[in-house]
Amino acid sequence: MYWQYVLRRVLLTVPTLLIASTLVFMVVRLLPGDPALLIVSDAQDPVLLEATRERLGLNKPLIVQYALWLRQMVGLDMGVSISTGLPVAELIGTRFAVTARIVTIACLVALLLAVPLGLLAAARHNRALDRGVMMASILLLSVPSFWVALLLILLFGVTLRWLPTVGYVSPSEDLLLALKFAVMPVLALCLTVIGQLARMMRSTSLDVLASDYILFARAKGLSEQAVLGRHALPNALAPTLTVAGMIFGALLGGAAVIETIFTIPGIGRLLVDSIYARDYPVIQGSVLLVGFVYIMVNLAVDLLHPLLDPRVEY
Amino acid sequence: MRDINMVVGAGLCLLWLLVALLSVVYMPYDPLAMALDGRLRPPSVDHWMGTDQYGRDLLSRILAASGVSLMVSALTVLAAFTAGVLIGAIAGYLGGSFDRLVMVVAESFMAFPSLLLVLLFLSISGPSIAAVILALSIAFTPMVIRVTRSSVFSLREQQFIEAARLSGSSKSAVLWRHLLPNCVSPLSILATSMFANVLLVESALSFLGLGVPAPQATWGALLADSRQYLAVAPWLSLYPGVVITLAVVGVNLLGDGLRDLVDPRLRQLVEGQNA
């Protein structure tokens, strides 16, 4: 039964992946100007231009181009960056790792704080704690993360001088220094996420806490701790995890702003830079990669959902 | 408690609207007038929010930007809803292969984080206020399609719709007169949360220098400008940030109020769309 659901859900991602990749392909083809002109060194040389078009397959019908392109993408052959000359796959791979690390930490920290806060708020429905958590979370999810970043720099970097303001150190070079550099970006990213997740956790917890099996657990004389932790938490967690997965995926692309502020060499920063430089192979590769990971994360979360909450029908 | 949320939210939104309207007829200074002898002045009686690196009055710049930010967000939500409700309603009502096609395409658009999609579109069109609105609308339409479609889909088999159909109403009459009015509550809640989201994404775009081009400035652009002067003129970062936050809090509170008023159970439906 569960495996049927897994199979169906996995099959459903195939058209999504295909259409998503078509979208990226079409958008890049819609770009004004001839891609060959961007690549050749001497745009005046008609022989060279024609050879480049031939090499890029630009003289073939669109559908053939798409098929060829798709085969290249699957084989991770994404071409060469126009502005740096590096292979795109390699470039986006290293940049993606940097972003993924920071976003993963931010989401984990946010989950660890938001889940208990949301659950406790629901358990104290309409009391001071609940109102406090709700007010704090609406504020957190409304504050632009890039403004939080500026405030953090102002506080910890400029005024208190506790942390280095901008820059990036790889954890393989110097772990402690890398952590110091990561504190502010992670904080800036996770505050918004805490707001979103705490609200989600609270509203699902309210539903769960109102259900019969919780009443039964209470009637059995279980402690409040056991009722919340062992009975309410697992079922209330599933929708929050789903949203956390979506947020994680969104942040992989959305961290561009934070990466810009802290000059972190992540995939978002790479994308913005390559938009400025009109470096289309890199734009295409990084958008595809983030889209692919986003689809996969959502798939994973959807597959996890019924395992966490046995009431879900699939 | 809920009423207070609603009142504060509506109040902040109204204030934003009034400020934007006011800025058309009155601003303390010309927001673009430079005064090189009065650069980076801290807030004072003359300049309530200080001046920027060219001696421009920050309050006037924020006032001028309030209209641009409001217009971009409002037009985006309007465009996304016009297209999304139309497509989603038809897909949900007709069902079948058209519905499947629309949903697969919408899901594929939603496979990309909205900021990423907007960046992708802007990389083709180049920066202009129309391109920003168009790119934002395209990125946000699929969510409207999904919510409209699932609302219509769930209402389709209800008895009052069956009754309308049996009494001889045409397909379009059933759709417009009976189905869509019943989708207003989830859609209005989606509209507020989307409005807040659009404002944040638009600010992020401006912050990256890919939003509405100068000399028109949105709040995000003011924040972006302030970055270099963070250490010497922190007020340049503080005030625009406070203003964006207040606007987003206002819209979010209004949305919460609406939601509680209409149907508390809708919370999850819309919150899931909000990532």
Image (cartoon, coloured by chain):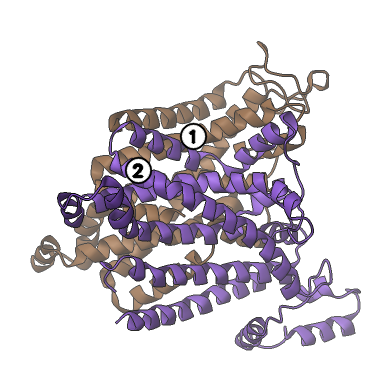
Chain to which the residue tagged by mark 2 belongs: A
Residue A10 seen = yes
Quarter of the picture holding the N terminus of chain A? bottom left
Residue B135 placement, left or right of A205: right
Residue B264 % position (x, y): 26, 46
Which tint is chain A?
purple
Residue that mark 2 sits on:
A120
Chain to which the residue tagged by mark 1 belongs: B
What amino acid is labelled 2 in the image?
Answer: Leu
For the residue carrying disc 2, how many other residues have a C-alpha within 10 Å: few (<14), some (14-19), or many (20+)? some
Considering only vertical position in the picture, is A270 above or below B245? below
Which tint is chain B?
brown
Q: Nearer the viewer, residue B110 or B29?
A: B110
Residue that mark 1 sits on:
B247
Considering only vertical position in the picture, is A90 above or below B231? below
Provide the secondary structure element on which disc 1 rests. Answer: helix
Residue at 40 percent of width and 56 percent of height:
A240
